[in-house]
Image: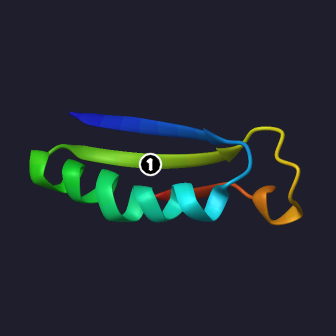
């Protein structure tokens, strides 16, 4: 079974991405599930937050 985890981000992108890398990915790696993480901008005020990133 494959699941998708979607994070709509509004500001604090770097902080949230670091938390995803340090906490969310290791957690789901331990479960043995196949997953995708989708990061999508959600009205961010910072220009660099206007990107969408995906990790499989």
Left/right placement of residue 6 relative to residue 41 reads: left
Give the residue pinned by disc 1.
37
Say whether residue 47 is left or right of residue 21. Answer: right
Left or right: 2 as drawn, with respect to 16: left
**Residue at 22%, 48% in the rendered image:** 28
In the rendered structure, the answer to whether residue 51 lies left or right of residue 17 reads: right
Q: List x then y, in percent, for residue 8.
A: 63, 38
Q: Nearer the viewer, residue 7 or 2?
A: 7
Tell me: residue 35, above or below residue 54. Answer: above
Q: Quadrant of the C terminus?
A: bottom left
Task: Say few, some or many: other residues with alpha carbon within 10 Å of mark 1 (under 14 / 14 to 19 / 20 or more).
Answer: some
Looking at this view, is 2 or 47 the one in front? 47
Q: Residue at x 39, y 64 (%)?
A: 21
Element class at badge 1: strand
Which residue does the image show at 24% across and 46% down from the upper left?
34
Q: Is residue 39 above or below residue 1?
A: below
* Image location of residue 3, percent across then percent down: 33, 35
């Amino acid at each position: 079974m494959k699941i998708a985890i979607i994070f709509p981000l509004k500001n604090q992108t770097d902080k949230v991405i670091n938390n995803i890398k340090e906490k969310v990915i290791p957690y789901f790696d331990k479960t043995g599930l196949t997953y995708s993480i989708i990061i999508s901008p959600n009205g961010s005020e910072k220009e660099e937050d206007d990107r969408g990133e995906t990790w499989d």
